[in-house]
Structures are given as structure tokens and as C-alpha cells.
Image: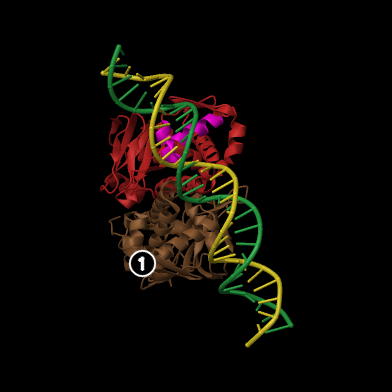
Chain colours: A brown, B red, C green, D yellow
Amino acid sequence: VFGVHLKKLRKRVHISAEEERAIRNCFSESRKVPDHHVLVRSGDELNVSLLLLDGWLARTKDLAGGERQITALHVSGDFADLHGFTLKRLDHDVCTLSDCTIGVAPHERLMELTNKYPRLARVHWLMTNIDAAIHREWTLSLGRRTAMSRMAHLFCELYIRLRIGDRVEGDSYRFPLNQRELSECLGLTTVHVNRTIQELRRRGLVELTRDRLTILDRDALEGVAEFDPAYLYLDKREL
Amino acid sequence: VFGVHLKKLRKRVHISAEEERAIRNCFSESRKVPDHHVLVRSGDELNVSLLLLDGWLARTKDLAGGERQITALHVSGDFADLHGFTLKRLDHDVCTLSDCTIGVAPHERLMELTNKYPRLARVHWLMTNIDAAIHREWTLSLGRRTAMSRMAHLFCELYIRLRIGDRVEGDSYRFPLNQRELSECLGLTTVHVNRTIQELRRRGLVELTRDRLTILDRDALEGVAEFDPAYLYLDKREL
DNA sequence: CGAAGCATTGAAGTGCGTCAACAATCGTGG
DNA sequence: CCACGATTGTTGACGCACTTCAATGCTTCG
């Protein structure tokens, strides 16, 4: 289970056996959390960071009127709130979108890790910077892409991110979000999300059932989305 | 000039005299860059990071059709591409929005700094995490706020960010963006930006001239924006 | 003074939102 | 295993926030 996280790191940087041990050592326990639970609430003081071992998480922000925006999605192997290690509290909630398994890294251990292995500090820093790059791509989507292109883009992004952790079968992956949650990612209403999905189906680009997304024509989908995975930084670098 | 940057850091963490010296030591030269220049191009390999000593910068992303989204604004004292230190290339361009003065930090010096002072690695990591928090707030704006509220929110955010660096006089600050650039921040057209500004003026909330923004009723503006500066993390923490 | 960029305005169009009803599916308890 | 309420997905009619297009006036600066 933990291997997915290391695989994600190793997609971007070299990790030695010793470094791997040091990273594993940061995690004390692992917990199961049911669907639709709030894991971290905005403003709470933090002294641990959570690694998502399995399942789906969202970072959500709300307006007074009840409108909700999901600012990020997380899948197996992602750190949910590594940024909380330096921020000490979050500006958003972290909620489960499915049953989840979570690894817990106390901040004091991350402190020791980053003191003893400055390179691993940079590696983890890199991972939060990749999160930020995804935020920027979402900003572009929300600001300038149409509903159709925005949705297509999200499906392409998740395909690539899930593939790193071997969570893709063929051109299909588990997709636990309902249309309301999808609308909260895309800045749309559920009604318009529904119509947009139907248009994607009608064009033969995707199939979306209760719990599973299948990409029927990846080239065409990426075309609609103007998808370029460069922002996911899937190449190795020296640190 | 460099003091503004340190002031920004010290708003969030303690920086000792020795640490200050170490940080200053990272910067080799300083450069002047004229208005509307591209400082860093998306995809270029990076070996320096740029500190904005004076002026305004934008991070921009484009679609094939020519639509442009500004994903972040930077003012005096902000690092423009500190995230480039770990990413090694950017997923966006960095452009000047005014005449600028830039400090240059070669990555090898940042490497030495983060090796020798793990705490300063965490401090700089924190700063990129605050950038990401601002990205998330923009995501919320683009996804869920109306044009009016979105614009009001941006004006409130910049007011606070500029005040840290003493770039605010009364309730007024220099604002070099034209309506096109403003529309690129807000995900709107220039026509609608123009009409929204007029509505803000009509309600007596702001005054916006060629080069200057004046907030006439900050409480009301923050109300329209549902502005809460918590996401800017303006409190001190241990690292 | 003249050209180029920028701000402003009006009229008409559209992508997406709102409201409201209904259908399908799911989860639960009997 | 079925019944039934609750949740989720689907559809239609209509409305609006924002866009598009295009013209005009206003700055600014060589």
C-alpha cells in the first residue's frame, strides 16, 4: 500500500534504500476512515500530516451561501495535507469521497526527517509544488475553458495520476464522485454537469457509470481538453 | 529594497541575524526589467530563482485559442518562481506588469542554503505553500464567486499583501494592471470587467484610475467579497 | 498633432443557472 | 428477497450573468 506513494516520488526523483527507510519511519499508525467524513477542518491546529494510502479525498472551500468548491482531488499515494506541516493550519477542509485508508505522519517526525535529510525536505517540497501546479491548471480550467473542455481535462488528469499508482484498468478507472461533487470540482451546477456528461457520451468520448469512468477515445478527449501532462512533472530531476 | 522580502518572512516566522545573512547571501546580482517582458517561459530549464524586489509580476497560462489566464500576481518582496527550485521548469510564463527590479538566486546557492539550514528550507517551503493557498482562494473565486465579488476579493487581497511591504498609502495603492490584464486574472472579458468596475464605483466601494486603486469603503468591499485573510497566514509559527 | 492603445457604451446572443418535476438506483429494514 | 424511502440522475422550460461584436471617445506619448 505504501509502495504507491514511493512510486509517485520515484517518478520524479531518485530515492535510495536508506531514504526510503527514513520516509517509512515517519509514519506511526494507519487508520481507516469511512466515506464522506471530514478529516481535517479549516483552521484546526495541526501536528500530523496525512498520507492517503487508498481511496479518494477532496480539499473543499465554502462560501457563506453554502456554495462549495473542491480545490483539489487526491488519490492513493497522495499526501492530503503535507502543506499543513509548514502552514500549521489549513485554509480548507479535507473530506473523504470514498472509504479511505490513511497513514499518519507526526510533524515532529517530519521535522527530524527534514533536519537529517535536507534532500528529502526538497523532495517533499517538490511534491507540494506539484500540487500547486495542479491548482494552477484548475485555475486555467475554471477561468478559460468551457464546461465540456473543463470536464474532459479533469478526466484526462485523473487518468494520468491514477495510472502512476496502477489504479487504471485498460482505459477505465474507479470514479467515486457523484454529479454534485463533480460540479463542485468544475464550478458548475449539477444540472449542467449532467448535460455535459451526456454530450461527452453522445460524442463517444467517455462512459460514466455509478462508480467507474471509462475513456472511449483518449486522443479525442485530450483534444477537447487541450490536455498536456507537462504540468504533472512526470520526469526525473536532480535534487 | 531587500528588506521587504525579509519583512514578509518575519510576518510568518522568526528569522535570526545569522539566518538573514545566509538568505541575503543567496542572491548574486539584481536586474532591472522593463514593463511587459517575459521573464521566464513555460518549460525552460531553470537554474536560478527570481525575487521581485520592486514592481508587479504575473504568472500566465494560455490556451491554443489565445485565451490567457493569470494564475497569480506578485508584488514587491514576493519570490516569482521559488517553486522552480524544485520543479526545475515551470508550467507557466512569468511576465512583468510594470517596470521591475529583480534579485537573482542561483539554485546552487539555494541548495547550499537548504543543506546548511534545514529550517530555512522549511521557511521557503512555507512561502511556496502560502502561494498555493492563494491559488486555492482564486480557484474558489473563479468557481463560485460572481464577477463583482471576485473583483472585490482581489482588491482586498492585494490591499493586505501590499500593506505588509508598506506599499499602501491610506486605503490606496498603485495598481498597474489595465482592464485586459484584470480580466485575465478574473476569468472575465474586458467588457464585463469594465461594467463591474463601474458598478463598484457606483456603489462607492472603490475608485480605480489609470495607475491607482483606492478603497473607499473597506468594510463594504470585504463584505461583497466575503473576504477573510486567514488564507494569507499572517501569523507567526514555529518551524 | 496624430496614432495607438485603452476605456466605455449599446445591442444582441449564448452558455450555463434556476426551478421544478420525474425516473432510476441504492441502501436498509422487514 | 422484496418494499420503500432516500439519494442520485435526468429532463424541460425559462431566466440571467456574462459574452460578443462593433462603434466611439479618451489618454498618452512620440
Residue A74 visible in the picture = no
Note whether B103 is above or below A124 in the view shown: above
Q: Which residue is mark 1?
A: A164
Overall secondary structure of the magenta stretch? helix
List x then y, in percent, for residue B81.
35, 43
Vertical side of A79 occupied by C15: above or below:
above
Q: Is residue A117 left or right of residue B158?
A: left
Extent of the magenta region: B178-200
Give how far across and how far down residue B194 sits, in percent: 47, 32
Q: Is residue B182 magenta?
A: yes
Q: Which quadrant is the N terminus of chain B positioned in?
A: top left
The local crowd at label 1, few if under 14, some if 14 to 19, many if 20 or more residues have their Cα within 10 Å, is some
Where does the image place residue B182, in percent across and percent down from the top left? 43, 35
In the image, what residue occupies the spot 55% across and 41% down?
A: B229
Name the kind of residue labelled 1 in the image: Ile
**Image-quadrant location for residue A110:** bottom left
